[in-house]
Amino acid sequence: MTPGATPAPFDPTALTLYLVTDTALSAGPSGSRSVLDVVTAAVDGGVTCVQLREKDASARDFLALVTAVAARVGERVPVLVNDRVDVYLAARDTGAVVAGVHVGQDDLPATAVRALIGPDAILGLSASTTDEFHAVAALPSGTVDYLGVGAVHATPTKPDAPEPLGVDGFARAAATARSTSGLPVVAIGGVTVADAAPLRAAGAAGIAVVSAICAAEDPAAAARTLRTALENSADTTPSPEGSR
Ligand SMILES: Cc1ncc(COP(=O)(O)OP(=O)(O)O)c(N)n1
Ligand SMILES: Cc1ncsc1CCOP(=O)(O)O
Ligand SMILES: [Mg+2]
């Protein structure tokens, strides 16, 4: 960024169709498909944001993945790093176009992450209870950019996810999250194309999916189908209450 220039504010429309990656699921029917293949196809199909999530990779391998994905799609959509602030910073230091980090309740606290990544990076935080929403609301303005709320449905992708909320429970959680924190909310957990319109109507700025795209035979087609379902639901979407 030019010195002195004002950074572009976080644009919540980037949350519309949010892909979170999984290496094992990405391998696909042939067993040889890579995360990079899936991300590329998914962005071509209409994904608006990508989070790289690697629970078992070494820091070195994760960094290589982040820089490869950022080189491929970082100019087209925000690329975020799950959990690993160190990997995000190392990628950014190499000049990679990486947008930010997503952390949860057991990861580094949001205030610590914001101090490490600086004011311009995107920071997403998982939250699912009223207490967690109130805690987010108490943070200094600009600490967190969006909330990941779930699980909507139970999912084998994250067996340790909070209790499933269901779509109605998500609607109540999203209303509390938005009224307390003013932040846009992404719905996550077992989300399929059938959930797209109901979740948008329930106040989701977007949906985050792992298996609906990573495990699909054709990730580009899966992304297109999800995106179409989201576009068709646009008329029922409440307007965002706030963003950074
Ligand atoms: C968009 C989005 N929402 C929620 C999560 C879950 O984050 P977390 O609770 O830290 O769990 P892990 O993903 O780290 O297992 C997410 N990753 N993305
Ligand atoms: C990362 C995460 N956080 C809550 S549920 C979940 C996994 C969602 O995966 P899937 O879309 O395959 O159910
Ligand atoms: Mg985490």
Image (spheres, rainbow, N blue to C red):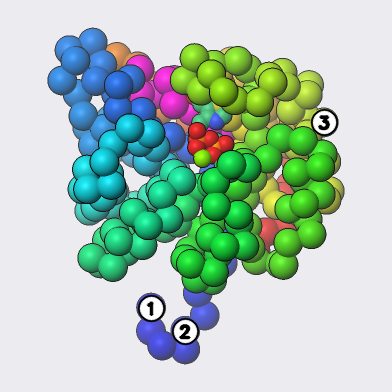
Q: Residues within 10 Å of mark 3 (few under 14, many from 20)?
A: some
Q: Magenta segment: does it hold 213? A: yes
Callout 3 secondary element:
helix
Look at the picture and state if 208 lies above or below 12: above
Look at the picture and state if 189 lies above or below 85: above
Asked if the residues shown at circle 2 and circle 1 are in contact, with their CB atoms under 8 angstroms apart, the answer is yes
**Residue positioned 26% across, 50% down in the render:** 63
Disc 1: residue Cβ within 8 A of ligand 1's nearest atom = no
Q: Which one is in front, 235 or 221?
A: 221
Where is residue 21? Give x, y as percent: 37, 32
Look at the picture and state if 119 lies above or below 166: below
In the drawing, what numbered circle is on residue 107?
Answer: none
Report, in whole angstroms, how far the alpha carbon at label 1 lies from the one at label 3. 39 Å
Residue span colored magenta: 207-215
- Earlier residue among tags 1 and 3: 1
Residue 43 location, quadrant: top left
